[in-house]
């Protein structure tokens, strides 16, 4: 069946930080661009980012992008591509300054410059230390301030938003070029084809594949699901970041900025245990290191509370004044979700799924690259991706705090610029294939036709439990093995999902069912990739292969939906202009 | 716990009705949103917006036992049973707890909600003293949830003409920014019997803001600025 068609120069799916930084480039350059979002733009999950944006401005002591680059490569456990990392760290200061010019309400120093706080893994002198103040912040609401600023700037640029429109599938023509997406207007339930010369994905993360997550409900990996169904590989999906400090029981995040400002972790004996695991950086070691230390404390019986299943984050010694001025949102969260006032009492915290290092493979220009003609990095014409849904890969096996917001700004802009170049070089629309809407229509009619079947709720919960149990902070060979089997069973159940509500107007049951179809691609990719990677690196920690294996595993995983198959590609060890940072043992 | 929820599906309901849901809460159900998600698992036809579940995205504003608030940061323990839930008042209902926010955003968009500074951008940041920056505290934190505007009688009567507390708070956010250069244009635009002066300081807005912001105070400051520039 053919769908009504709308035509735009470019379609951007996602109005978070990455999508709106990209749309700004296109709208200000005068292109007809449609920005689709499941939620009103300022409700995108970038709004929840707390701690800051990493950029070597050097406002509060010496810093350089070379140091930032070193920390990022080391943080990535040498799985990050050094060309993209150089690009990001070099461009970061300019991107932050630009954001300030857009009106971002950064905190300020006495001399009027942007305030920067210390953050985990960010050091002076090529990792030698001490900690550097690199995280540009607006209290502990940096993401909120940034997302609103970008939205405001887009209002000024007259960007055309399609609010509460859910993209369903990517459309490629027989040559593989991307020519549009299908999408559903949630208010009416109507489905349309968006025909475009270029499509840019900025759909954010998929943290909702885990039962315990800092992520919003809408973070369901839709971009990854759409890409996978259209034959695009997903890169490095075994690497999931567990943030050390999610509120125990609730999952809500407590920013690392708390430790940046001087807070620290305690076990049940009141011991500041990070001193044992990371004698130098202590509580400001990289996230994978801190999360593992916490999980070890809990596993060895030194957790707090009746079930000994959390540790404590102490910050009362910072004083009420500092907490109110620099960490007001944290105080609010702790009171609401943990029933403690951090001015007096420590906050119970546990490692919680937070960030997806993997995603849609891109290069430093924001072009999506995939296997074709014998190569692993052929540019997919007309297709771009940026932000958490993309794998550039700047974060490798472990992302440093503050580097995601940097990623959104730098690669949001770069992908926007690359799209503009492509639009100029390719002024005509490629034809929509006759079967453009088939995948989508089949998915929708399957849901509409079925009267009874699995519930979205049950299947979704099962999926999250499997990931939580089989793909967590510590990974074990037998659990991975079973996990792959169990997630394939969940996959079969997903195909049998039925919804009771078949109405058209704002039917969120249908939306949730379609989201689970994306989550399952993410979950299968993660477990299959994790099962195959026989080493420990960054966030991927295997009991049977506890060491990093540089000889065999400095390579990116590529998972393909067809046949649930894996391929590998080399890590880019050569930066654009700097010298290669050679792999070393990683200690903090 | 008993929940009495406003239901309306324009495709099949001639008019809205209230529906009761009696549910067993689990120990982990802390907030109203947790309960709503449990209800949705039983009756998937209930529609509501939600995303961040921590009070920062502004999606799940609704009328809770007669008062506007966010479901995700409203503690179940603080609620009287039955919990009566209605869509935000004064806006057209699309379905169930989902309202059409167009009018609300139109007013927000009408205040030029972006920084205007026509000087050529310097190579570095525009400097701002910590004191000047602190003028933005209590303003920039708005999450555009609409709890305030939809509890404001003046906004109910004139949603097309009165900017409303949320929009005015943002208008003042830019007036208060030492980097902004459009002060007189912004004030000209607000010097209007409806856009600004429909506010009669009833303070409903302050009472409901889930972020503890004070639109009435901001509105007062805009009025002060108008008075000052007359003399
Ligand atoms: C609690 C928390 C705190 C964080 N703090 C920090 C921090 O201090 N510093 C830092 O660097 N990073 C931080 N991060 C990480 C960072 O915030 C995210 O990685 C980043 O904001 C993701 O931005 P994005 O633009 O890629 O996606 P998002 O902001 O998640 O936006 C995704 C967009 O895609 C849209 N979308 C998705 N699917 C569809 C679809 N099918 N159709 C249409 N639209 C769709 C959504 O509506 C949304 O507009 C934090 C993350 C969390 C969860
Ligand atoms: S103080 Fe003004 S804006 Fe606030 S509710 Fe009253 S009339 Fe409305
Ligand atoms: S001022 Fe408060 S109540 Fe009004 S929209 Fe902003 S956050 Fe919501
Ligand atoms: S879900 Fe985001 S504010 Fe409640």
Image: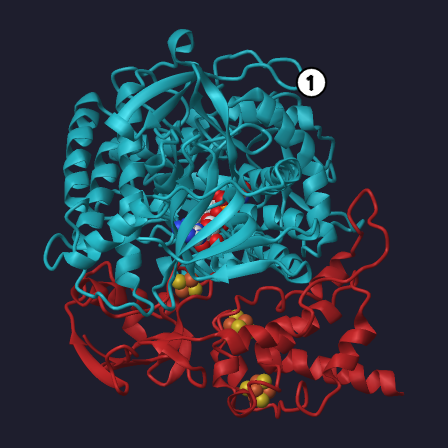
Chain colours: A cyan, B red
Q: Chain of mark 1?
A: A
The residue under the point 66% across, 39% down is A424
Residue at the (78%, 51%) spot, across then down = A110
> Which one is in front, A156 or B90?
A156
Name the quadrant containing residue B12.
bottom left
Along the horizontal axis of the image, is B223 left or right of A53?
A: right
Position of A140 with respect to A299 (left or right) is right
Q: Quadrant of ligand 4?
A: bottom left
Nearer the observer, A219 or B76 = A219
- Pointer 1 residue Cβ closer than 8 Å to ligand 1: no
Q: Residues within 10 Å of mark 1 (few under 14, many from 20)?
A: few
Number of numbered discs overlaid on the protein picture: 1
Depth check, front residue: B145 or A60: B145
Is any atom of residue A376 visible in this view? Answer: yes
**Which residue in the structure is indicated by mark 1?**
A577
Residue located 66% across and 90% down the image: B194
> In the displayed structure, would residue B192 be above or below residue A439?
below
Image: A444 above or below B218: above
Give the residue at the far top of this rendering: A551
> Could you tell me residue B146's position as x and y percent?
49, 75
Residue A434 lies left or right of residue B45; in this view the side is right
Residue at the right extreme, as displayed: B231
Name the foreground residue: A210 vs A569: A569
Instruction: Report the residue that reaches farthest toward the left.
Output: A452
Is residue B190 placed above or below B54 in the rendered structure?
Answer: below
The x, y position of residue B92, in whole percent, is 42, 82
Q: Please say if A170 is above or below A284.
A: below
Residue B152: x and y, percent?
A: 52, 87
Residue A527 percent across, percent down from the top left: 26, 30
């Amino acid at each position: 069946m053919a769908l009504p068609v709308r035509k735009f120069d470019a379609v951007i799916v996602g109005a978070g930080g990455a999508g709106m930084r990209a749309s700004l480039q296109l709208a200000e350059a005068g292109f007809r661009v449609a920005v689709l979002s499941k939620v009103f733009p300022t409700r995108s999950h970038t709004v929840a980012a707390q701690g800051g944006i990493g950029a070597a401005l050097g406002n509060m002591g010496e810093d350089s992008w070379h140091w930032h680059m070193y920390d990022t490569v080391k943080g990535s456990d040498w799985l990050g591509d050094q060309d993209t990392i150089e690009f990001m760290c070099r461009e970061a200061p300019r991107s932050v300054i630009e954001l300030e010019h857009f009106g971002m309400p950064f905190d300020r120093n006495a001399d009027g410059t942007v305030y920067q706080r210390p953050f985990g893994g960010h050091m002076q002198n090529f990792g030698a230390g001490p900690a550097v103040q690199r995280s540009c912040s607006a209290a502990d609401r940096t993401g909120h301030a940034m997302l609103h600023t970008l939205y405001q700037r887009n209002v000024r640029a007259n960007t055309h938003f399609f609010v509460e429109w859910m993209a369903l599938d990517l459309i490629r023509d027989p040559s593989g070029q991307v020519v549009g997406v299908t999408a559903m207007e949630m208010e009416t339930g109507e489905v349309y084809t968006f025909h475009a010369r270029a499509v840019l994905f900025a759909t954010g993360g998929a943290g909702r594949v885990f039962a315990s997550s800092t992520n919003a409900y809408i973070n369901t990996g839709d971009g990854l699901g759409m890409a996978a169904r259209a034959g695009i590989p997903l890169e490095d999906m075994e690497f999931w970041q567990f943030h050390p400090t999610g509120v125990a029981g609730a999952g809500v995040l407590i920013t690392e900025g708390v430790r940046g400002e001087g807070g620290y972790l305690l076990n049940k004996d009141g011991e500041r245990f990070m001193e044992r695991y990371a004698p130098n950086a202590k509580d400001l070691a990289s996230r994978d290191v801190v999360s593992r230390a916490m999980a070890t404390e809990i596993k060895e019986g030194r957790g707090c509370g009746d079930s000994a299943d959390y540790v404590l984050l102490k910050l009362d010694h910072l004083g009420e004044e500092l907490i109110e001025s620099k960490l007001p949102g944290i105080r609010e969260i702790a009171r609401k979700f943990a029933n403690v006032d951090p001015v007096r009492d420590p906050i119970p915290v546990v490692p919680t799924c937070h960030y997806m290092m993997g995603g849609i493979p891109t290069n430093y220009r924001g072009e999506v690259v995939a296997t074709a003609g014998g190569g692993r990095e052929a540019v997919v014409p007309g297709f771009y991706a940026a932000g958490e849904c993309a794998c550039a890969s700047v974060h490798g096996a472990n992302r440093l705090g503050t580097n995601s917001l940097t990623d959104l700004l730098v690669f949001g802009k770069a992908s926007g610029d690359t799209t503009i170049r492509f639009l100029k070089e390719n002024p005509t629309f490629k034809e929509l294939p006759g079967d453009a809407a088939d995948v989508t229509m089949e998915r929708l009619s399957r849901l509409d036709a079925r009267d009874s079947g699995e519930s979205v709720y049950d299947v979704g919960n099962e999926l999250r439990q499997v990931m939580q149990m089989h793909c967590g902070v510590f990974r074990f060979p037998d659990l991975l093995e079973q996990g792959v089997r169990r997630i394939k069973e969940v996959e079969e159940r997903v195909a049998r999902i039925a919804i009771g509500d078949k109405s058209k107007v704002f039917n969120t049951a249908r939306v949730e069912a379609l989201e689970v179809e994306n989550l399952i691609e993410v979950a299968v990719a993660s477990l299959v990739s994790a099962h195959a990677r026989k080493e420990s690196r960054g966030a991927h920690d295997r009991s049977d292969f506890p060491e990093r294996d540089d000889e065999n595993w400095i390579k990116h995983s590529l998972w393909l939906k067809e046949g649930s198959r894996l391929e590998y590609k080399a890590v880019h060890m050569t930066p654009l202009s700097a010298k290669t940072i050679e792999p070393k043992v990683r200690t903090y | 716990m008993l929940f009495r929820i406003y239901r309306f599906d324009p495709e099949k309901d001639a008019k809205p009705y209230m529906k009761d849901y009696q549910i067993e809460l689990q120990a982990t159900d802390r907030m109203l949103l947790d309960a709503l998600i449990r209800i949705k698992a039983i009756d998937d036809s209930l529609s509501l917006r939600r995303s961040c579940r921590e009070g920062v995205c502004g999606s799940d504003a609704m009328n809770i036992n007669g008062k506007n608030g966010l479901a995700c940061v409203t503690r179940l323990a603080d609620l009287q049973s039955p919990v009566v839930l209605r869509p935000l008042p004064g806006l057209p209902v699309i379905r169930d707890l989902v309202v059409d926010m167009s009018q609300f955003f139109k007013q927000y968009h009408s205040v030029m909600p972006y920084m205007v500074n026509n000087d050529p951008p310097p190579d570095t940041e525009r400097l701002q003293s910590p004191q000047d920056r602190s003028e933005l505290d209590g303003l920039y934190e708005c999450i555009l949830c609409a709890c305030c505007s939809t509890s404001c009688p003046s906004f109910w009567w004139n949603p097309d003409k009165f900017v409303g507390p949320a929009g005015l708070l943002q208008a003042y956010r830019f007036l208060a920014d030492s980097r902004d250069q459009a002060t007189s244009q912004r004030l000209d635009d607000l010097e209007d019997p409806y856009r600004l002066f429909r506010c009669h300081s009833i303070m409903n807005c302050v009472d409901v803001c889930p972020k503890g912001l004070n639109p009435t105070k901001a509105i007062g400051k805009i009025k002060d600025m108008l008075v000052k520039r007359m003399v």
